[in-house]
Image (cartoon, helix red, strand yellow):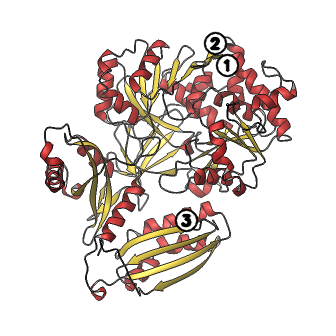
């Protein structure tokens, strides 16, 4: 199952191996058929291993069919959206396949979402039913009045404090008198299960805006399961160890497509997780960079074993090279990462298991193409030059809910990922940053992630994040938030005093800047207790920018208002169309406006009581700068589309009164 290597880059395009290499894995055309085939070929093999016990493929298929029958009765047929939380437990696999076999569509919901986030994804997906763990019931009940389409709530299992009147899936199945067994009907005969029909709804992370609903077809999921299993070298003898905070669908599909064994681990300590992986003879250890980084410096690392390990695999964000090197040296296996998006089912790239290249996400997987384009002109970049990553392949989504895929791809089918990266001559991809995170200083493209890599090498830095800070002449400069390592030699007890912090920050900045080109220099360092991150370890730069913006406002020097000219603009929208699309278009305009001369700040508010009401506020150096910006095509094009979705009440405003606290004065 070892794929042929990607061709070298031709005309700026890196191409993966032929899809023909996946012939042995591409028999099924529906997701449910993956399980059907595995259950028939290896009914007694362990499919899922959890602390409560093992589940064989025959048992998994039997549970899935039982749940499918129950859902068909509950929902009065196929064609509904069923929300399913991605809790890392034994319930997810049979429920996911059960929803699929029933002819309904699973919408995968992060169980860590708060009430507002939970209401948002259920509302935009139009879920008719939600299958949730008991711990989520109270949270969902609090927002149920905001979800008119939600008719049923079903629990994955019964807990001591579960409401007696809320059924579990087992309750529903028992009422029907169904018993576990191999599937009794042909999945291809079920409505809604054609290869090009929607198999699953997933949601973008929402770290740079409201989550969007991604529609994935049966073909998307089956092909990507085969693509990923091939390059990860997962086979029927593999034991896939899943050490993540929530369930990732890919780990289930790549295991089932080869009828391997999936182990789920919720152990908080990474060393104890590795002990468990050794006990179960794990061959593939999947985790997040933040967890692997902790494992790499764990005091028990030297005593840990991985006698059956073939690879340690990372995803979600960039794995620090030092952590990868430490783990690879200790366990004697490749420690690698890939690249992908919810929109690509998710994988498009994977690093070599034979000769991994540090910091690379690897070459395109079979049937996939990638290129790098200049952010403004969209022309293809030369090899080695940074630009936006574009991909195309059979795993590319059907589109966002309510939108045709053609609206988010160009005429040749290229999808813009929103990530900045570069390729080498062999087509290996190096992801640099999110396009919304990079900024320009003196017209040079600056990547916060690249600066963070240098910062993290400093002995006084335990963790860090970099954001852009507006600058009068350069456009923006790098601003660093740093968690100090008080065990470092540079930081002695005296440095803990507040009056010494500035000196330490200056020393750190000077040493780091000496390793960077001038346009990447960190102009200020602020010490913080922690860096805000998402559950997958991604830095929440929005929170840091908001903190920086608030601090800047509080520290504004006191001077007569006439010495600080400012154009204040306020706009109220009443959205009559799709709010998701409205926010996307407004975000596009904001990205453009933020690059224009005279831009100072921007905020968007959404009414809590009336979610279709928005208010935006902006500050510009003067009215002339604002007029020049709104005359550009980057503003006028998206505005024409926004007018189809919302009514606006815009207008400039004059500042009448400004009042601050005494501390900020």
Q: Nearer the viewer, residue 445 or 56?
A: 56
- The disc, 3 or 2, on the residue closer to the chain's N-terminal end is 2
Instruction: Provide the secondary structure element on which disc 3 rests.
Output: helix
Tag 1 residue: 38
Q: Which residue is mark 3?
A: 585
Quadrant (top left/top right/bottom left/bottom right) for the C terminus: bottom left
Determine which of the numbered discs, if any, sits on residue 417 in the image.
none
Judge whether 16 appears above or below 528 on screen.
above
For label 2, count other residues whose C-alpha is less than 10 Å away and answer few (under 14), some (14-19) or many (20+): many
Q: Position of residue 494 (x, y in %)?
A: 12, 46
* Label 3 vs label 2, nearer the camera: 2
Decide if residue 572 is on the left or right side of residue 531: right
Residue shown at 67%/11% (left/top)? 44
Mark pair 3, 2: CA separation: 50 Å
Circles 1 and 3 in contact, beta carbons < 8 Å: no
Pointers 2 and 1 in contact (C-beta within 8 Å) = yes
Image check: 155 left or right of 279? right
Q: Which mark is residue 45?
A: 2
Instruction: Indicate the position of residue 475 as horizontal and vertical percent values.
Output: 29, 68
Choose between 530 and 445: the one closer to the eye.
530
Q: Residues within 10 Å of mark 1 (few under 14, many from 20)?
A: many
Q: Disc 2 and disc 1: Cα gap in Å?
A: 9 Å
Q: Position of residue 129 (x, y in %)?
A: 75, 44
Whether residue 7 is visible here, answered yes or no, is: no
């Amino acid at each position: 199952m070892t794929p042929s290597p990607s061709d070298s880059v031709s005309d700026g395009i890196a191409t993966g191996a032929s899809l023909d290499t996946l012939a042995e894995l591409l028999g099924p055309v529906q997701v449910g058929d993956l399980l059907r085939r595995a259950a028939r070929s290896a009914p007694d093999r362990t499919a899922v291993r959890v602390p409560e016990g093992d589940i064989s493929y025959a048992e998994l298929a039997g549970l899935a069919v039982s749940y499918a029958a129950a859902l068909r009765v509950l929902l009065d047929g196929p064609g509904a959206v069923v929300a399913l939380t991605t809790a890392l437990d034994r319930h997810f696999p049979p429920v996911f396949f059960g929803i699929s076999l029933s002819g309904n569509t699973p919408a995968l919901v992060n169980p860590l979402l708060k009430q507002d986030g939970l209401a948002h994804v259920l509302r935009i997906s139009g879920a008719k039913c939600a299958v949730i763990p008991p711990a989520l019931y109270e949270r969902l009940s609090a927002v149920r009045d905001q979800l008119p389409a939600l008719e049923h709530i079903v629990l994955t299992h019964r807990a001591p404090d579960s409401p007696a009147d809320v059924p579990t899936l087992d309750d529903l199945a028992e009422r029907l008198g169904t018993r576990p067994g191999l599937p009794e009907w042909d999945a291809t005969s079920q409505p809604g299960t054609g290869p090009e029909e929607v198999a699953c709804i997933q949601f973008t992370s929402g770290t740079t805006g409201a989550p969007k609903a991604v529609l994935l077809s049966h073909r998307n999921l089956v092909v990507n399961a085969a693509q990923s299993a091939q390059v990860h070298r997962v086979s029927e003898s593999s034991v896939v160890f899943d050490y993540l905070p929530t369930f990732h669908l890919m780990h289930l599909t790549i295991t089932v497509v080869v009828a391997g064994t999936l182990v789920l681990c919720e152990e908080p300590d990474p060393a104890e997780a590795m002990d468990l992986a050794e006990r179960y003879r794990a061959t593939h250890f999947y985790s997040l960079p933040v967890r692997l980084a902790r494992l790499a410096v764990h005091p028990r690392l030297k005593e840990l074993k991985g006698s059956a390990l073939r690879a340690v695999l990372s995803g979600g964000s960039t794995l620090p090279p030092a952590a990868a090197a430490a783990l690879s040296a200790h366990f004697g296996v490749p420690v690698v990462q890939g690249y992908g998006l919810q929109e690509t089912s998710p994988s498009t790239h994977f690093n070599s298991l034979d000769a991994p290249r540090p910091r690379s996400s690897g070459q395109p997987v079979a049937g996939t193409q990638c290129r790098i384009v200049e952010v403004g002109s969209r022309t293809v970049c030369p090899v080695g030059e940074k630009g936006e990553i574009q991909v195309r392949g059979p795993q590319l989504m059907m589109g966002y809910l309510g939108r045709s895929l053609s609206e988010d791809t160009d005429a040749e089918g290229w999808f813009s990922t929103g990530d900045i990266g570069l390729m080498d001559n062999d087509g290996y991809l190096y992801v640099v940053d999110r396009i919304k995170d990079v900024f320009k200083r003196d017209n040079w493209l600056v990547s916060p992630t690249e600066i963070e890599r240098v910062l993290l090498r400093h002995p006084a830095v335990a963790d860090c994040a970099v954001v852009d800070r507006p600058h009068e002449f350069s456009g923006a400069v790098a601003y660093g938030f740093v968690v100090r390592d008080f065990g470092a030699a540079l930081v002695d007890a005296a440095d803990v005093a507040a009056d010494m912090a500035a000196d330490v920050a200056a020393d750190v900045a000077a040493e780091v800047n000496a390793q960077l080109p001038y346009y990447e220099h960190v102009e200020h360092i602020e010490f913080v207790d922690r860096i805000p991150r998402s559950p997958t370890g991604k830095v929440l730069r929005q929170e840091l920018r908001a903190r920086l913006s608030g601090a800047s406002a509080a520290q504004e020097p006191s001077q007569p208002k006439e010495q600080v000219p400012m154009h204040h603009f306020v706009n109220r929208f009443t959205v009559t169309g799709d709010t998701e699309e409205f926010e996307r278009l407004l975000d596009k305009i904001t990205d453009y406006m933020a690059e224009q001369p005279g831009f100072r700040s921007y905020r968007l508010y959404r009414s809590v009581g009336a979610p279709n009401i928005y208010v935006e506020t902006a500050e510009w150096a003067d009215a002339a700068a604002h007029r020049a910006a709104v005359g550009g095509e980057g503003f006028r094009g998206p505005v024409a589309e926004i007018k189809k979705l919302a009514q606006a009440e815009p207008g400039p405003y004059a500042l009448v009164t400004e009042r601050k606290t005494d501390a900020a004065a």
